[in-house]
Image (cartoon, helix red, strand yellow):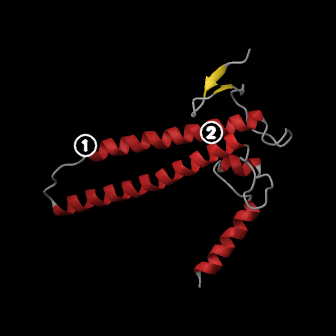
Amino acid sequence: MPDVGLDEGSTMKAEVFLPEHYRPAEDEPFMNERQLEYFRRKLVDWRNDLLEDSRDTIEGLQDGTRAIPDVADRASEETDRALELRTRDRQRKLVTKIDAALRRIDNGEYGYCEVTGEPISLKRLDARPIATMTLEAQERHERREKVHRDD
């Protein structure tokens, strides 16, 4: 009988065995159970790392609230805090994209271009697991964006 684990949505499902050094390969069926589990784990680990960093930042900001008498030191501290908050905001948006990718895995849509419906290369997904378009579709999208931005 397969191991049964709870996923994020608390639904019961059989856990997929994934060898320790597994990497998705082109010579296996695209988005098979192992590939999906590989990307699910990669996304969940990434998400957990971002959330841990966020908790650390919040604690640091709460602990770091102190009166600094020197104006230059205070300005430097405020600049550092603003930079940290911008970084955390970008990471918050990234967590949203990770959650969307995890939903696509659950819905059977992960790994396929939202524009063309073609498979996104495993190499691209490994480098950017939140990718929603093939490299070619992304480049077309960015060229169109650039043209409209120049108007």
The count of marks equals 2
Residue 81 appears left or right of 18:
left
Front one among 136 and 79: 136
Q: Position of residue 59 (x, y in %)?
A: 31, 41
Q: Position of residue 4 (x, y in %)?
A: 66, 21
Q: Position of residue 144 (x, y in %)?
A: 68, 75
Front one among 60 and 96: 96
Q: Which residue is mark 2?
A: 42
* Label 2 crowd (10 A; few <14 / some 14-19 / many >=20): some
Residue 78 sits in quarter:
bottom left
Residue 82 appears left or right of 46:
left
SS label for mark 2: helix
* First in sequence: mark 1 vs mark 2: 2
Residue that sits furthest to the right in the current view = 27
Residue that sits furthest to the front in the current view = 11
Name which residue lies at 83% across and 43% down: 26
- State the quadrant of the N terminus: top right
SS label for mark 1: helix
Q: Position of residue 56 (x, y in %)?
A: 37, 41
* Label 1 crowd (10 A; few <14 / some 14-19 / many >=20): few
Name which residue lies at 60% across and 48% down: 100
Residue 3 appears left or right of 25:
left
Name which residue lies at 79% across and 52% down: 119
- State the quadrant of the C terminus: bottom right
Residue 72 appears left or right of 50:
left
Residue that sits furthest to the left in the current view = 69
Q: In the figure, 14 relative to 86: above or below?
A: above
Residue type for callout 1:
Asp
Residue type for callout 2:
Lys
Mark sitting on residue 63? 1
Residue that sits furthest to the top in the current view = 1
Residue 106 sits in quarter:
top right
